[in-house]
Amino acid sequence: MADSAVKIPFTEAAAPSTPATGKVVIYAKTDGLLYSKDDAGTETLVSGGAGGGSVATDAIWDAAGDLAVGSGANTAARLAIGAAGLALVSNGTTAAWGVQNAHGCRVKRASGDFSVGNNTLTAVEFTAEDLDTDTMHDNSTNPSRVTIPTISGVTTGLWSIKASGYTDATSGRVDVSFRKNAAGNPASGTPLAFDGFTAAAVLGAYHLTTDAVFTAGDYVECFVRTTAGAGNAVYDADVSPIMTVAFLGKVT
């Protein structure tokens, strides 16, 4: 049976001039695609629809690493490759090259030793901050707590917790623990980590680190105790006592 489909050949050429009022012309350009041009001079790709044509040879590309980023309804713009080491991030409006913001809190004492009980785990109160990106800590209201925020819409995430310092204990042991939502009570909330250290003849140092899953609104506290009589978590500017809580990522 003979092929009865109508075929219209087009000669590839440069775009024609704007047609007369009320007219539209259809033509083939040297890229092998069909276009139309109306009486306002607006050129529209016809073959393959609005998304037709070869992506690999689209005129939007200028250099290696270029990306096409939506700039509005049915429109896109070229985003050139960023500098070495940058990542593609959202600036809240569009995609851009940048670095991910850090989220966390590093707290310490502004001055003065902090008394910890003999054989009683005591929540250390931190009265100063080196870093607090998301209002996680208050130096006067519940100063032992570091509260977990929502991070870019993420309410449940993995967080790193570290604490270190030293006491004036010269014998016995120094114990340290992290607890979640304990309200200053070492028997309340959820235990997260614990360790004990033998006090030296000069001082009783401690260090504790762990990772934990938190939901926005949870808080963590660091508890310290000595076992050979009541002691102090010694204040040493920027050294003791300190605690750092840092966001690691979303938990799904």
Image: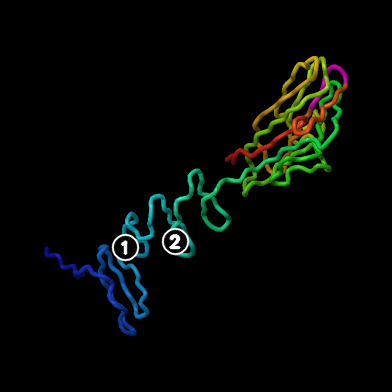
Q: Is residue 242 magenta?
A: no
- Residue 202 screen position, x and y as percent: 80, 17
Residue 148, quarter of the rendered image: top right
Which corner quadrant holds the C terminus?
top right
Q: Nearer the viewer, residue 205 or 142?
A: 205
Amino acid beneath label 2: Ala
Residue 145, quarter of the rendered image: top right
Tell me which numbered mark, 1 or 2, is placed earlier along the sequence: 1
- Residue 52 screen position, x and y as percent: 33, 61
Q: Distance from label 1 to label 2 (Cα)? A: 18 Å
Residue highlighted by disc 2: 76
Q: Look at 80% across and 29% down and name the residue there.
A: 186
Q: Nearer the viewer, residue 64 or 6?
A: 64
Task: Describe residue 64's horizontal placement relative to residue 243 as left or right.
Answer: left
Residue highlighted by disc 1: 48
- Residue 106 screen position, x and y as percent: 72, 38
Q: What stretch of residues is rendered in magenta? A: 224-229
Which corner quadrant holds the N terminus?
bottom left
Q: Residues within 10 Å of mark 2 (few under 14, many from 20)?
A: few
Residue 50, quarter of the rendered image: bottom left
